[in-house]
Structure formats: C-alpha cells, structure tokens
Amino acid sequence: MDADRMNAILALLTPDEIEDALFFVEICERGGGTPPEEADEWRRRILAWRAFLRLESNRYV
C-alpha cells in the first residue's frame, strides 16, 4: 500500500482504535496475508500516530 493511502487510513483512527489496529496488523501478518516488512511499516506508522495523538491531547491540558 502506498504511503498516501496508509496516512489517510491512520488519520481516521481514534485513540481507542489504536490497539485494535495493532492487533489487526498482527493477525494479518500471522495469517500470511501481509509480509513482515509491510506489517512492520504499519506498526511503525500506527505507533507514530498514537504518539502524535498523545502529544496533541497533552497540548490542551
């Protein structure tokens, strides 16, 4: 999947959905539907998005 699509999908995730997204990536990788390199890239981007959301939420506290 190209980076633009990946970023668009991540932008839709709420903080509550982050763990579900990580679990989904794990299932896709273990099931053989997603190559390990792509799964790692998804995890990296999801975790970066989670860090961004945390920074944003702390900014308004």
Image (cartoon, rainbow, N blue to C red):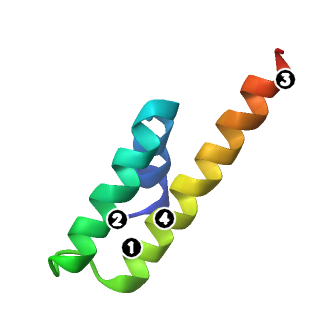
Task: Name the residue carrying label 1.
Answer: 39
- Of residue 3 and residue 55, the one placed in the foreground of this image is 55
Task: Name the residue carrying label 2.
Answer: 1
Task: Name the residue carrying label 4.
Answer: 43
User: Nearer the viewer's eye, disc 2 or disc 3?
Assistant: 3
Measured in 3D between alpha carbons, the distance from the residue under mark 1 to the one under mark 2, in whole angstroms, is 11 Å
- Checking the image for residue 59, the label placed there is 3
Q: Is residue 29 left or right of residue 12?
A: left
Work out whether 28 lies above or below 57. below
Measured in 3D between alpha carbons, the distance from the residue under mark 4 to the one under mark 1, in whole angstroms, is 6 Å
Mark 2 touches mark 3? (CB < 8 Å): no
Measured in 3D between alpha carbons, the distance from the residue under mark 2 to the one under mark 3, in whole angstroms, is 32 Å
Whichever of labels 2 and 3 marks the residue nearer the N terminus, that label is 2
Q: Secondary structure at mark 4?
A: helix
Q: Residue at x 42, y 83 (%)?
A: 37
| Quarter-of-image position of residue 57 | top right
Q: Where is residue 26 shown, x and y percent of the image?
A: 31, 68
Q: Secondary structure at mark 2?
A: loop
Q: Is residue 39 left or right of residue 24?
A: right
Mark 4 touches mark 1? (CB < 8 Å): yes
